[in-house]
Amino acid sequence: MAKKKIGIIGGGISGTALGYHLSLYDGEAEVIVFEKDTIGGASTAKSAGTVCLFDDSLKNRYWDVRLYGFESYLKMEAEEKGSAGFDKTGTLVVATNEEVEKVIKTGIALAKAAGYTGEYITDKDRIKEILPDISTDNILGAGYTADDGYFDGTMISNTYAKKFQKNGGVVKTGVKVTEVVVENKKVKGLKTDDGQEYEFDVVVDCTGPWSKFTGEMVGLDVPIWHTKAEAFFLCPPGKKLDYTFPVLKYPEFYGLRAGDNIFICKSHLSMDLSNPMHAGQWDPDKLPATGGTDDYFIDFLLDQLEAKVPGIVDSGLVSSWLSYRAEPKDFWPILGETPVEGYMLSTGYGGNGVIEAPAATRDLAKLIMRGESTPLLENWAFKRLL
Ligand SMILES: Cc1cc2nc3c(=O)[nH]c(=O)nc-3n(C[C@H](O)[C@H](O)[C@H](O)COP(=O)(O)OP(=O)(O)OC[C@H]3O[C@@H](n4cnc5c(N)ncnc54)[C@H](O)[C@@H]3O)c2cc1C
């Protein structure tokens, strides 16, 4: 049987996870990942990497997506310490109203069903034991688990790339795809900036914030907006906290420890695509490695800290960075077939790519290799946006 030839554009968490899942179809596929820079060096590197057992970033409806991601990374970490960069700090998800409380309680029940610990705490002294700097005014309670934390997206991407290569896959870094060859509305292959030309049965666009531009290579308008992901690193008063700062989730923002510092960022679901301060369509190649942030976001976050975590509001600002989250207008990824035969998408992961990439690309690999769809692919299909 002839092997299926698949080209993947982009070596972030989406492209490398897809390469890995395709390589599990032992010997049935010839797959090349093209990455113009380094593996996991773009949005994936700027990510907070939180994959919490329960929080509001991903609806409980997609619990299995969350669990598959979380457990894939736990297994990686168990195979080789550090390969998923796991920092097991636990997570505290704060209930600011009854609706959020219900979501947290459902998440706890789901986590417990999968064998993890989780508790909904209303005793405010106990909440302060977990996070001494928090204000418990105006909250109903908080969900807590000690079992999760955050991962390192770049490490995960490199581990997926390594496993993919071990299974026979090819990774080309520093190679930019410059043209996708289409004949009679069907993909035939692609060309790269080192003058090479490749033939493929399927080309998968895994370029995240670049998808709008790469889509143009096949005449496709990929409906991606960029929300500004502005991350700030704070040095707590006294330079070092004497407790483990958990992943801290509020509907408006989240925080986590980053070494001795604290990473804070406005949550992606609180971004408004029609507000030019929050969102637009920009050139991701112009993003600086650090800095580039707006006062608007740090002012917003400091106001949030003052009201909610006053103990760290006097922190010093150590550094910051700006990145773009690739968001379709309904904030769900775009997965699978497009109107151009053979051109598939695995993009638009917004603020949840680390959580979603394993399950999304597992299902996409099955579609590519077997032509079989899944409920996830149906829900996140390109055609919903037409
Ligand atoms: C500040 C911040 C915090 C976040 N926090 C979380 C979190 O806590 N949990 C979570 O789940 N998600 C989080 N996310 C979201 C997550 O990081 C992204 O959804 C995910 O990394 C997107 O991965 P990707 O592979 O789609 O894109 P990318 O990582 O951007 O990869 C795309 C790749 O395509 C390459 N490329 C582009 N054009 C070409 C071309 N023509 N040829 C070859 N290569 C090309 C690029 O160089 C790039 O490496 C966060 C994001 C940010 C910015």
Image (cartoon, grey):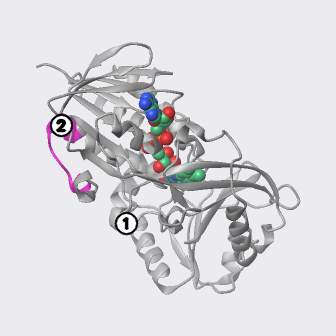
Q: Secondary structure of the magenta portion, mostly?
A: helix
Question: Which quarter of the rendering shows the N terminus?
Answer: top left
For image coordinates 73% across by 61% down, the residue present is: 295
Query: Which residue is outermost to the right?
Result: 238
Give residue 95's position: percent from left, percent from top: 55, 79
Q: Amino acid at mark 2?
A: Glu
Disc 2 residue: CB within 8 Å of ligand 1:
no
Give residue 288's position: percent from left, percent from top: 66, 40
Which residue corresponds to mark 2?
341
Instruction: Tell which circle, 1 or 2, labels the residue nearer the N-terminal end.
Output: 1
Give residue 221's position: percent from left, percent from top: 32, 46
Query: Which residue is outermost to the top?
Result: 195
Q: Whole-Å distance between the Cαs marked 1 and 2? A: 41 Å
The answer to whether 39 is drawn above or below residue 106 in the figure is above
Question: Which quarter of the rendering shows the C terminus?
Answer: bottom left
Count how many numbered circles sit on residues in the image.
Answer: 2
Which residue corresponds to mark 1?
113
Q: Is residue 186 left or right of residue 96?
A: left
